Image (spheres, helix red, strand yellow):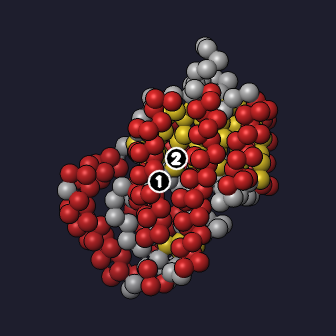
Amino acid sequence: MAANQIRTYQNAVAIVTGGASGIGRALAFELAARGAEIVLADLQIEMASDVAAQIRTAGGKANAVEVDVTDYAAMERLVQDTAESRGRLDYMFNNAGIVFGGAMNDLNITQWNQVIDVNFRGVVNGTQAVCPLMKKQGFGHIVNTASMAGLMPNPLNVPYAATKHAVVGLSNSLRVEAAHLGIRVSAICPGLIRTPILEGGKYGGMNMNIPVEKLRDLWEELKPIAPDVFAKKALNAVAKNKAIIIVPSLWKAIWWINRLSPALGRAVASSRYAKMRKEFNL
């Protein structure tokens, strides 16, 4: 393969932000299994280092770097150091994310700013840092983790939904703008995946008076899938350069409902929200 072509995925180089756990961890393991070299970028450096060590033990290539995605200078250094040390950068997975769940009246502006900074500004920083390099290379794929919450109404999760809608908008627009430069852009929109973010994760939280057991039961109703299953399906779609990647595929029906009839999509969301309010006395 020519040096100025993207590699799928054998001998490719990929950065995965938020690679210490959840979707990022699963993507890193699957990328490594397919022959890519991974740089796991995360604030949780001990966890990220452990993931990298597990990948190396399994015969893959990976290392961990402590990075705050909200710090543009740090993201720029990450991209430059990776490309200089490895000679290329095929994939930038802007995956780091947090959530503060709860009704708008129970949130505060600090929580809003944290969600915006990680979920959207983190994607902006990663994208802006990598675009000049990929333009110079003449190839590269930016893969932004959005969510089904970026394609439909998501009451009790308004900050998260707002940032994920923004990620989808960024990805769709940049995909058109950057295509002639050889830069691919995709937005991954997971349905429900069994990860720590379902309960807020380390840096988020759930501002709802719902017992953890009840919250887990609520998620189970929506049949979350395992992260490793998600990663396999998502990377297959990335390899095909899909613009919007929805996994599990059953969530595509919900996407189509919201595309064809936004009013119906809001009605479905409203019905589920009313059920939650009644069941949990919200």
Query: Residue 74 location in percent, x, y?
Result: 73, 53
Query: Residue 82 location in percent, x, y?
Result: 74, 37
Q: Quadrant of residue 172?
A: top left
Report if residue 50 is visible in the image.
no
Q: Looking at this view, is 217 or 73 the one in front?
A: 73
Q: Quadrant of residue 217?
A: bottom left
Residue neighbourhood size for the residue with mark 2, other residues' Cα within 10 Å, grouped as few (<14), some (14–19), many (≥20)? many
On screen, residue 238 above or below 160: above
Of the residues shown, which amino acid type is indicated by label 2? Asn
Query: Residue 260 location in percent, x, y?
Result: 20, 51
Q: Secondary structure at mark 2?
A: strand
User: Do the CB atoms of the residues marked 1 and 2 lie less than 8 Å apart?
Assistant: yes
Q: Give the quadrant of the N terminus.
A: top right
Decide if residue 77 is on the left or right side of residue 166.
right
Q: Quadrant of residue 275?
A: bottom left
Q: Looking at this view, is 18 or 167 the one in front?
A: 167
Report if residue 17 is visible in the image.
yes
Residue at (47% x, 69% y) in the render? 159
Of the residues shown, which amino acid type is indicated by label 1? Val
On screen, residue 166 above or below 7: below
Residue at (44% x, 85% y) in the render? 105
On screen, residue 282 above or below 248: below
Q: Looking at this view, is 97 or 270 the one in front?
A: 97
Decide if residue 118 is on the left or right side of residue 269.
right
The residue indicated by pointer 1 is: 167
